[in-house]
Amino acid sequence: MTPASGIDPDLTRKERREQARTERKAIEAAAAQSARRTRMLQLGGVIGAAVVIIVVILLATSGGKKEGIPTTSSQKSSEVTAVSSLIKGIPQSGNVLGNPNAPVTLQYFGDLECPICKEFTLSVLPTLIPKYVRTGKMKIEYHSLETATREQETFRTQQVAALAAGKQNLAWYYIELFYHEQGTEDSGYVTESYLQGLAQQVPGLNLPNWSAARNDPALAEQVTTDAQTATSQGFNGTPSFLIGKTGGKLLPFKPESFSEPSAYTPTIDKLLS
């Protein structure tokens, strides 16, 4: 979600996270209700039993989030294939996806459990990555900002797990798979078994080396540094963004949508012009 202007700067960090989480859930609920209302109005001209059946189906399918955690090997294989088709062959280094000399840099601050980050990752990045990252025009840096994850230790553990894959230049596989297989918020789905399962799906990841890298204190420090950077920019929600020409000053970018690529391309194109 975008940072809420109504958040009191005197609140503690934990209180700000809770307030941001509450506001984000309210936005999600309002969006879901609006979508249901729109669909029902579209059905208003249809008469008879068919209307009843369709409305029931729409309400049933639009209410609540479904868990994305695969339960079969074929489902896992499908997710790996989708992620590989998007980023395979693109240079990676640590938390960076793309040519290190790309003229534009986008810093993406996210919480791996954030459902709106999932929406952005699955709806917007499949357009931005082929158009700008694969072509060497832009690089994306992934940074951590705790908003949706309720337990601070869980947040640190999951974010470090992704960064640990970056030690083998595979962090973006882990990040993408996490969002593709994200469970229901506040359900406690992020366990050691879940994190290990994601690692096992990352193509080419050396699991013993990944496990060892998770104990690297520099990665935990990176999570802390990301939080400090986010605070200095006034970010209270995820996803949040900084964008600019590589090597220059990056500025906050507040897109109007987290699901429409058209909310991002004009800004990127302007920087490239």
Image (cartoon, rainbow, N blue to C red):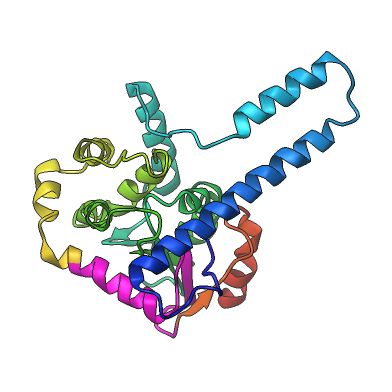
Q: Residue furthest top?
A: 49
Question: Depth check: 67 or 107 in front?
Answer: 67
Name the side, left or right, on which 201 lies relative to 139.
left
Q: Is residue 239 visible?
A: no
The question of residue 157 being in magenta is answered with: no
Q: Residue at x 26, y 37 (%)?
A: 194
Quarter of the view holding residue 187: top left
**Residue 222 percent location from the top left of the image:** 23, 68
Residue 211 visible at all: yes
Q: Residue 151: name its quadrant.
A: bottom left
15 displayed left or right of 163: right
Asked which quadrant contains residue 101, the reply is: bottom left
x, y (%) of residue 146? 35, 61
Q: Nearer the viewer, residue 92 or 124?
A: 124
Residue 225 in magenta stretch: yes
Q: Point out the image quarter for the C terminus.
A: bottom right
Q: Residue at x 75, y 40 (%)?
A: 37
- The total of numbered circles placed on residues is 0
Residue at image location 21% in from the left, 53% down from the top: 157
Q: Which of the two residues, 147 or 110, is positioned nearer the viewer here? A: 147
Numbered range of the magenta stretch: 221-249
Q: Residue 127: percent from the left, percent from the top?
A: 56, 52
* Viewer-closest of 226 and 92: 226
Q: Residue at x 39, y 82 (%)?
A: 247
Question: How far across and how far down the image is residue 225, in percent?
Answer: 26, 73
